[in-house]
């Protein structure tokens, strides 16, 4: 998907930067070069880049790797940076900064990428993809009237539906794997003499190591044993990294725990359970929700708040989703049963989409940061999420990996039909 992540998106952002600089120098020149500035202008690009950089401590690595200021470093952005920009950050951060046509166009491109890279693509999704690429190009040319934007990448995306129909999902033949292999080959070269011979020896030795376990099953390198154990360990779910000293509960936390166990706090048995919790409960630092997400408590073993806040999405037994920040992870035995619990500060007033355009996909809006403390089984935690703010509007947003649950194709269709009619 180089044509999107290293073609259309970087080119579009470069066009935004060029228009902003030209507008600053000469507003009339910018109008004649870019067409109608009301359709394509994006304001406060420096603030947009700063918002991405400022969320580094509130977005886990499972969602985005080392968010960087796109305005300052867009020339050095790589494919994974542009992926995070397209799928996570750009849609809510453009609220207030860009017209609805620009945001709708990028939201459609994000959905095109997601559909084209699915593991399996149903026929209905393929039909949507074929229509969506034509609508994207139509709206893109309607927004950016500068002839220089009509590059080979913009033409190539028109054939994406045919490529998927004939060859399968885009991940089956994209070039990222080959680029990784080329990077490995370059790292194997040592010295400036006999490069062909050195490279051939490096490839041979590398393949011999890869095949060693099948050639000699009884011979296995110690580092390989360690690697396999770590890989197996990371895929298991459950609480890990136990804290040696007992937890120091606050009054609020004890009250919520007793309410979860369904015991009256002021009763005699409530006092007994309170003392038992303080003496026998076991603290943990980490919970492996799945193979990708490792949840850590916001308060570390020393009682201090950790550097990176850990926000999670949960699903209760009523299939109701809610979002919050993990305070404590603990295990407690009561009445012959062992409970693995999490104390979560749950966010109130979460918006699953904006009422005006519903373009956010992976993102949900927060009206405010009002919370209440709740005690839940750790099994209700689905995955980690991130939090970031749009400084232009003062709104906060939740970043969620599983955006399909909140996507809205019908809105894209309606808005793009309007664009086509107006064009």
Image (tube, rainbow, N blue to C red):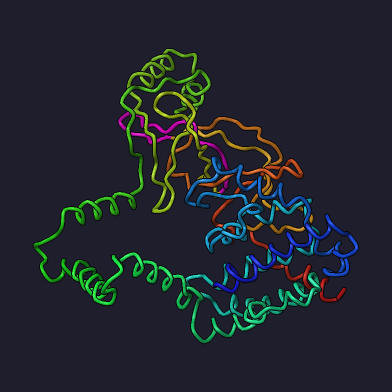
Quadrant of the image containing the N terminus: bottom right
Q: Which residue is more in the foreground, 293 or 175?
A: 175
User: Residue at image x 23%, y 68%?
Assistant: 206
Quadrant of the image containing the C terminus: bottom right
* Relative height, residue 229 to residue 172 (above, below): above
User: Residue at image x 71%, y 40%?
Assistant: 367
| 336 falls in the magenta region | yes
Q: Which residue is more in the foreground, 173 or 372?
A: 173
Q: Horizontal placement of 184 versus 116: left or right?
A: left
| 142 falls in the magenta region | no
User: Residue at image x 88%, y 59%?
Assistant: 27
Image coords of residue 389 (percent x, y): 67, 43
User: Residue at image x 45%, y 34%?
Assistant: 297
Image coords of residue 163 (percent x, y): 55, 83
Residue that sits furthest to the front in the current view: 193
* Start-end of magenta stretch: 320-341
Q: Which residue is more in the foreground, 222 or 228?
A: 222
* Relative height, residue 55 to residue 107 (above, below): above
Image coords of residue 231 (percent x, y): 29, 54
């Amino acid at each position: 998907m180089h044509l999107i992540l290293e073609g259309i998106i970087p080119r579009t952002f470069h066009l935004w930067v060029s228009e902003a600089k030209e507008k600053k120098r000469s507003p009339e020149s910018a109008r004649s070069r870019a067409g109608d500035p009301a359709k394509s202008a994006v304001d406060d690009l420096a603030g947009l880049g700063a918002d991405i950089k400022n969320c580094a401590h509130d977005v886990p690595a499972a969602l985005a790797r080392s968010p960087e200021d796109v305005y300052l470093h867009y020339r050095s952005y790589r494919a994974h940076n542009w992926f995070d920009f397209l799928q996570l950050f750009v849609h809510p951060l453009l609220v207030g900064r860009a017209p609805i046509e620009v945001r709708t166009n990028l939201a459609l491109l994000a959905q095109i990428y997601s559909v084209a890279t699915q593991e399996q693509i149903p026929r209905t999704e393929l039909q949507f993809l074929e229509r969506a690429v034509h609508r994207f190009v139509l709206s893109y040319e309607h927004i950016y009237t500068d002839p220089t934007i009509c590059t080979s990448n913009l033409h190539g995306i028109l054939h994406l539906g045919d490529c998927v129909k004939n060859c399968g999902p885009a991940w089956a033949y994209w070039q990222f794997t080959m680029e990784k292999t080329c990077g490995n080959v370059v790292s194997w070269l040592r010295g400036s003499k006999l490069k062909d011979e050195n490279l051939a020896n490096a490839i041979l030795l590398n393949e011999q190591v890869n095949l060693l376990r099948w050639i000699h099953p009884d011979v296995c390198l110690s580092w390989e044993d360690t690697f396999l154990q770590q890989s197996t360990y990371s895929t298991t779910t459950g609480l890990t990294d136990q804290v040696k000293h007992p937890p120091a509960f606050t009054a609020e936390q004890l009250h919520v725990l007793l309410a979860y166990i369904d015991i009256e706090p002021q009763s005699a048995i409530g006092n007994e359970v309170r003392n038992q919790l303080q003496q026998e409960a076991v603290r943990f630092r980490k919970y492996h929700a799945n193979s990708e997400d490792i949840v850590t408590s916001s308060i570390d073993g020393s009682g201090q708040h950790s550097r990176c806040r850990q926000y999670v999405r949960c699903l209760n037994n009523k299939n109701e989703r809610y979002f919050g920040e993990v305070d404590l992870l603990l295990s407690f035995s009561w009445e012959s049963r062992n409970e693995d619990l999490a104390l979560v500060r749950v966010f109130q007033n979460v918006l699953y989409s904006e009422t005006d355009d519903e373009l956010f996909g992976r993102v949900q809006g927060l009206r405010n940061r009002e919370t209440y403390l709740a005690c839940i089984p750790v099994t209700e935690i689905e995955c980690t999420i991130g939090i970031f703010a749009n400084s232009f509007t003062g709104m906060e947003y939740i970043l969620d990996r599983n955006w399909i649950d909140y996507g809205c194709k019908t809105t894209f269709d309606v808005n793009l039909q309007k664009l086509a009619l107006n064009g």
